[in-house]
Each structure stands twice: as C-alpha cells, then as structure tokens.
Amino acid sequence: MKFNRKAFTDSQLLDIYKNLLKPRLIEEKMLIALRQGRISKWFSGYGQEAVSVGATMAMHPNEYMLPMHRNLGIFTTRGIPLYNLFSQFQGKADGFTKGRDRSFHFGSKEHHIVGMISHLGPQMGIADGIALAGKLNKEKKATLVITGDGGASQGDFHEAINVAAVWDLPVIFLVENNHWGLSTPSSEQFKFRSFTYKAMGYGIKAKAVDGNNVLDVYQAVTDITTEIRENPGPYILECNTFRMRGHEEASGTKYYPDGLQEKWAKKDPVDNYRTFLLEKGILHPDENERLQEEIKKEINDAFEKAFVAPEIEFDKATEFVDLYAPVKHELIDPSDEAKEARLVDAIHEGLKESMRKHNNLVIMGQDIAEYGGVFKITEGFVEEFGKDRVRNTPLCEAAIVGSALGLSVGGYKAVMEMQFADFVTEGFNQIVNNLAKIHWRWGQNADVVVRMPTGAGVGAGPFHSQSNEAWFTHTPGLKVVYPAFPEDAKGLLINAIDDPNPVMFFEHKALYRSIYGPLPEGYYHVPIGKANLIKEGNEISIITYGSGVHWALEYLNANPEISADLIDLRTLQPLDREAIIASAKKTGRVVILQEDVMFGGIASDISSMIMEECFADLDAPVKRVASLDTPVPFAKALENEFLPKKRFAEAVEELLRF
C-alpha cells in the first residue's frame, strides 16, 4: 500500500495514527468482552477504520456527520467520552439513549453526529436537511453521510441524492463499499462496477478511493469539502474496503470464499499505516508501544467504570416524559375580531401567520411554490417568502420527510405537505421510526409538521380518499391533530408549528371549501390535546372528529328533541381522556363515529377505554360507527354507502331505545 503524505507534517501523521489505533483497540476489547458475556452484541468495523478516521479528520468539528454501525472511528475521532460510549453499548444510564437503544443508534448534538436506525437508508435524507439548513444560513459547511454498498440499494439512496442534486446541497454521500451485505456479495446487490457510475445520472460529481488507505480518504474528503463549501453540490465518494468480521459477531463469516479474508488482511489499514510510519522514521517502536499501552489503559478504565455502573431502573414517568420535547410557548387566545371563512382559508392563514412569525420556518411539498399546491393552500407564498422557504420538491416523500428532520437538527422548523394523505406510505418509515422516536432515543427534537389532506366524499377513489390517521395514533412520539372547523384549523396549525415535536396535521379535503365559520384575525393558538364540547345534553354522548362532527351536527339539528353531548376530539394524540370519560359517565350512552374503517380505528381504543373506566356508569353498550372494512370506492353511489353517515343515525336511535 502506497501512502502519499503530500503536505502532511510528521505531527499530523502521528495524530492520524493515534485516531486509527483507538477504534482498533476498542474493537479488540469488544470482541473479548462479547466472548465473556460482558456485552450482548457487537457490529464490528475491524478493517474499515481508515474510512471513519480519514473522513472525520478531514471534516470540520462543527460539520455534521451521519455514520453507520461500522463507523466507531467517527465517534472516537470526534472525542466522544469512552465512558459514555461503553455505557451506551452496555445499556447503562450514562449512555446516550438511557438504555433505550443499542450500538451506534444515537446521536450527539455536541459532537455534531446523527446516528443511524436499523433501516440503513433514512439518514441520507436527514443529511439533505442538515445541509439545507447550513446553506440557508450561508454557513459554508459540508455534511457527510455514510451508507454501505448494501444500504445503497434502498430507495432512500436515490431519493436523497436526487434531492441533493436538484437543490445543490453540500453533501458527501460516502459509500463504504465492503463488498458484502451481510452474507450477500455485491454481485447479487448490483450490476455496475463502481458507485461513481451513478453520479452521471444525477448530474453530480463522484470519486472512488482505496478505503483502507487513511491518507487517501483524508485527502479525498478534504478536496471535496473544500470545493463544496464554496460551490455547494453533492458528491458520491466510494471508499473500497472489506469487513473482516461478520455482519455482527453471531452471524460469523463462513460464507466468505476461502482465502478472501487472508487477501484483505494484507491490506489492513492499521498495520499498513503503522509500517509506513515506522519505515519513514516518523514513529519509533518504543513510541508505538507506549501509545498502545496508553490507549489500552484509557479503554479499560472507561469500560470497567461503565461495567460496574448500576443497571438502569425502570421509571415509568421518565419513559413518558422523554417521549416528547418540552413545549415552552405560552398559548395565545384568539382575538374577538373574526370574519366568515372556509376551512381552506384557515389553513392558508395559519401557514402564512407562522411563516411571518418564524423566519426559520421552511415549507416543502410537491407543486406548492408557484402553483400554490393542488388545493391552492400556499398560493401567493412564493411572492412573499421566496423559493428558499417555499420549496417545490421532487416526488421523494421519504427524502423530504428526512430533510424536514434534518432541518430541525439544523435549528429550523419545517412543514411538509403530503399532496394527499394516501401518499404518506412513501415516507412512512421516516415518520414512524425517525420523527416519532428520535427525542425519546437521544433527545433530538423533530420540529416538523406533516400536513395530510385526507378523507373521502369527493369521488376520488381508493388512492386519494383513505382515512389513515390511526396508523399514526398507534405510533408513540407523534402528535395527531384533526380539526373540523376554520377557527380550530388555524389555531391548531399555528400551535403545531410552534410545538417542537412532530405533528401529523389532518385536513379533510371535502371540508376545505364546503365548511364556513368564524375565523379570528391574527396569531392565536388552539390547545393540542383538548377536545371541544360543541353541544351539551344528558341522553347520549357522541364522540367524533373531522367530517363526523358535521354529520353529527346535521343529525342533531334535524332532531332537536335528542339531548346529546357532542364532543369534537380535534386532537387524536394526545387524546382528551378526561372529556371523554366525564361525558360517558354523565350520559351513560356513547356512540363513537369515525370516517375511518371500523377495524383497527381509533374508535375501538376509545370504546375500550370507556368500557374499562366507565362500565358501572353505562346504560347501554358503547357503539362504534365507521366506514365499511373495504377500500374507498370511486363511484358516488358506492362511496355514499361505504361512508357511515346513514348508519350513524341508526346507531343513535338504537342506543336511545336500549
């Protein structure tokens, strides 16, 4: 292996060696600890240290890096305390996730690191958002995100690079090509010879280097970052290397062909670099021994301190406290001045008020800029706020949700419009595994609102009419909001944007231009997690949200003799349990109405909650009314019968007769 020292001083070359040596010695310690049963699992980067160390030393300390599970050298080179690192590996309280996640599934804002999740690809979209935040701030910073050759087969890889290319983002997409995805060789993962060939299709630049040569990696990252800090644009950097150990230790390496490990052992990044330093007289053998003993002592001391630390004790309150970032803003009441407006106007005004208040708010979505979105919610926004803050996106829902999270890491707020709620499936993983869990895992808030035009009643068929809010009420860490009136829609949207947590904001398409109501002027909040008691009565409780509120109002107005509590939930997560329980206990009869299909909907959970907490107060079984358990049909005659409006009246009358 040839090392081109170029302009490196002897001191710099020694610093590189120290940084290479530390993760290698930790690897050796971890392999012993695993055999001794002192840690439960280990994903080894043995033989790949040059990629992590070379890349990290070339990046500025305040530039974000998004590593994978074989990039121990990024964490050690960035100076993360070994005690905390070993506490993380052992599931102790002083680890970065308080025992909630393992391995390198964590980040550290202090060290400008955002860790991975097991799905491998989603961190690439986050890198886009971090780079966008830096670009909007004119900071001249680069962002580096790592994926493996196997992970590069995921759609996240394409989406993130495509978005970075279109937006000229200063991101290095470093492909750590170790030629195997667990037991599957590269020949069964892709047909091309090099990842650099992909760059041409995206209209971006690429480079390939020997990933076992730490100086080549260092120099490549230095050259690229120097360029893209001044002239932003993405790069693909392929670092060819090899995984000497198994995917994780339990899986072994029996699938490797005979002689392959021996071949790559000759290219060992640590051994070869040490030999180079010794031959050049830069490192003396005695100094090498001293360094090794010094680092081993640091490792052993930190490991033993973490090992003897007490096991984590479960505290239920703490688990829930950490689920959401603290909400610090004080609620602003609506003004007395109001005008008559539609639901669509309320959403428009809520967004506009928030954009004016928060200079760090970016909204993103398909066709939302000059076109104003398919529902014209953002019409005129480009003229007032500019295209930096009102961003048309490619059809890359996963990358854009990831970018929204990256913007949050970079200190921005983000609103992302799903063109239709049905399309959220393309960004589902980012929402339920990144947005929802990131604060609970390691304290990074996700200051993101995902707008969800939803619902049936407009003859749009099975791919533009689904009610999918229950997918997200089932996901701890998300807030789910679903207004039915203009005043609530504006105040809840403003509140959702002020909230530092991820909010799924559902807007019923059929109500956009059919529902009118008073809309207060100016900036105000409607509380998240607080239901609205629209009508009061003693005979029956009707619990609903969205279009169901208007169906119930229509029925009650046509039947004024019925004395009913009508509760508009407004927020589905967190749920206003107190309002529901109080009403159920008062009336003794409850019907829960939802537009969603029956099985697995939120009505089922509300019904169970009432039965568990109010059974002795009930005079009749709790009744659920919902759409049919089929996809949403297109033809009007079919859609009308699919929806539960007619069945709702029957359910109320049945309960009143009970």
Image (spheres, rainbow, N blue to C red):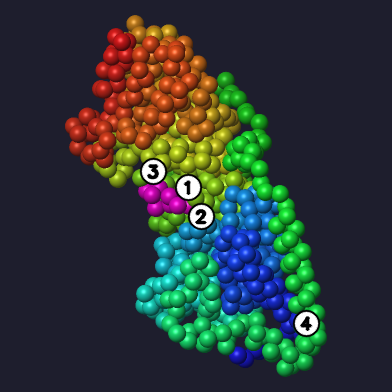
Counting from the top left corner in percent of width and height, residue 214 is at 64, 81
Specify which label sits upstream in the sequence, 2 or 4.
4
Span shown in magenta: 423-432
Q: Which mark is residue 289?
A: 4
Residue 421 lies left or right of residue 47; in this view the side is left
Q: Among all residues in the image, which is located at the extreme top? A: 561
Looking at the picture, which amino acid does disc 1 mark? Answer: Val
Residue located beneath label 1 in the image: 432
Specify which label sits upstream in the sequence, 3 or 4.
4
Instruction: Assess disc 2: are there few (<14), some (14-19) or many (≥20) residues with their C-alpha within 10 Å of its C-alpha.
Output: many
Instruction: Give yes or no for contact between labels 4 and 1 (Cβ–Cβ under 8 Å).
Output: no
- Real-space Cα separation, disc 3 to disc 1, in angstroms: 15 Å
Residue located beneath label 2 in the image: 402
Specify which label sits upstream in the sequence, 3 or 2.
2
Specify which label sits upstream in the sequence, 2 or 1.
2
Q: Residue at x 65, y 49 (%)?
A: 98
Question: Relative to 658, is 528 above or below?
Answer: below
